[in-house]
Image: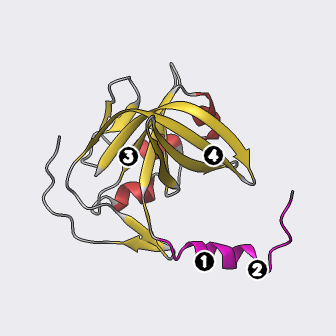
Amino acid sequence: MRASSPDFDSNFFKSALGRFPTGVTVITASLPGQPPVGLTVSSFNSVSLDPPLVVWSLSRNSSSLAVIQQCDRYVIQVLASDQMMFAQRFSKGTAAERFEGAALTTAPNGSPRLQAGCSAWFECANRSRYEEGDHFIFIGEVEHCARNDSLPLIYHAGGYDLTPSPTDTKR
């Protein structure tokens, strides 16, 4: 059943959604023998504690979509308040440009991960994918995660909310 037609346009809808502050993440993944892809995503949330599941969405127009749909695992990095440069870098340009100068490591199951001190990271098995509207919805089953005490980068009303970050206690 389709809902009735909305009484607003997409710009108004986007502005209304912007009233809800979100964290900012960078998602990284790769396929065997190929360079990694990475993208900035703010549509991240928890789904379940048992099993540990998270959800996020990606535009069907994303240049990273094919890799994300096919990969076995990916890493979701929650950016710290002093990492706006990663949010901006991974939201534009080519895959190679996004990773230029970014130190990478691997998560326990081999997924590419930013080495920088993100607030948290989650290595996820690519459990489920759903096509809805102009996006794909991904459910990840968290296999490994870590966190520190740094404040997260917040996106609100079309911009970043920059709060000073305390000294990180890295793991």
Q: Which amino acid does label 3 sit on?
A: Gln
Chain part drawn in magenta: 2-20
- Residue, disc 1: 16
Q: In this view, does 142 lie to the left or right of 11?
A: left
> Is 17 rendered above or below residue 75?
below
Asked if the stretch drawn in magenta spans residue 130, the answer is no
Secondary structure state at the residue bearing disc 2? loop
- Pointer 3 with pointer 4, Cβ within 8 A: no
Chain-order first, disc 1 or disc 3: 1
Chain-order first, disc 3 or disc 4: 3
Q: Which amino acid does label 2 sit on?
A: Phe
Distance, label 2 to label 3, CA atoms, is: 33 Å
Task: Give the residue drawn at x 49%, y 58%.
Answer: 42
Q: Is residue 117 left or right of residue 132?
A: left
Q: Is residue 32 left or right of residue 115?
A: right
- Pointer 2 with pointer 4, Cβ within 8 A: no
Q: In which quarter of the image is the C terminus?
A: top left
Instruction: Provide residue 120's location: percent of width, then percent of height.
Output: 31, 47
> Is 67 rendered above or below residue 6?
above
Distance, label 4 to label 1, CA atoms, is: 21 Å
- Residue, disc 4: 137
Q: Which amino acid does label 4 sit on?
A: Ile
Of all residues, the one furthest to the front in this rendering is: 50
- Residue, disc 3: 77
Chain-order first, disc 2 or disc 1: 2
How crowded pointer 4 is (Cα within 10 Å; few <14, some 14-19, many 20+) is rated as some
**Which is in the foreground here, disc 2 or disc 3?**
2
Q: Which amino acid does label 1 sit on?
A: Ala
How crowded pointer 3 is (Cα within 10 Å; few <14, some 14-19, many 20+) is rated as many
Chain-order first, disc 2 or disc 3: 2
Asked if the stretch drawn in magenta spans residue 19, the answer is yes
How crowded pointer 2 is (Cα within 10 Å; few <14, some 14-19, many 20+) is rated as few
